[in-house]
Image: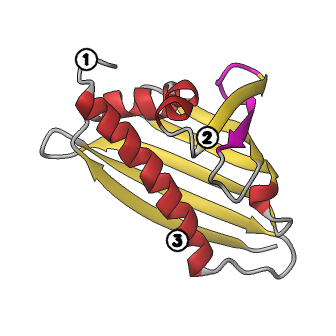
Amino acid sequence: MGVFTYESEVITAIPPAKMFKACIVDGDTLIPKIVPQAFKTVEYIEGNGEPGSIKKVTFGEGSQFNYMKEKVEALDKDKLVYRYSVIEGDALMNKLEKITYETKLEASPGGGSVCKTSSKYYTIGDFEITEEGIKAGKEKALQIFKAVEAYLLANPDQY
């Protein structure tokens, strides 16, 4: 088993607490509403969103994947940190044991925020992650993030 780590940052005009609440805390209901082609449904199998909870995400019509199960590893609403692992589903392609994501939102000098994400891919056997595979996942995540940002800019009284 190998572990491949990928780090990324995205800057937004939305303040960190507001973006965290919309994207992370309420993301399970907001994202399917505003980006149905990404996530069709999100349902909790165990728990209610706190650490240890397991949820099933069914992808939208345009996705190459059907579903994934995620385990919430950490949720710190004060420090604006969220960590979860994809533990099951065709997104793992039978080549990954799991993928762990950690997202942290921090204030940026202009009043918005910086979203820092660390992704760890735990491979099975000698499988190696390609840059193309990472880039495709990053692009999809960025589209969702930008859709939430656009929603918040268009609806400033929300959150």
Q: Which mark is first along the chain, 1 or 2?
A: 2
Q: Secondary structure at mark 3?
A: helix
User: How many residues crowd mark 3 within 10 Å: few (<14), some (14–19), many (20+)?
Assistant: few
Indicate the position of residue 132 as horizontal and vertical percent values: 57, 78
Please give left or right for residue 107 compared with residue 101 in the image: left
Mark number displayed over residue 135: 3
Residues in magenta, as a range: 47-60
Q: Is residue 93 above or below residue 87?
A: below
Is 51 one of the magenta-colored residues? yes
Residue type at numbered disc 3:
Lys
Residue at image mark 1: 157
Kindly indicate the quadrant of the structure image that contains residue 64: bottom right
In space, the residues marked 2 and 1 are separated at their CA atoms by 24 Å
Residue type at numbered disc 1:
Asp
User: How many residues crowd mark 1 within 10 Å: few (<14), some (14–19), many (20+)?
Assistant: few
Q: Secondary structure at mark 1?
A: loop
Mark number displayed over residue 39: 2
Q: Is residue 97 above or below residue 78?
A: below
Residue located at (61% from left, 35% from top): 74
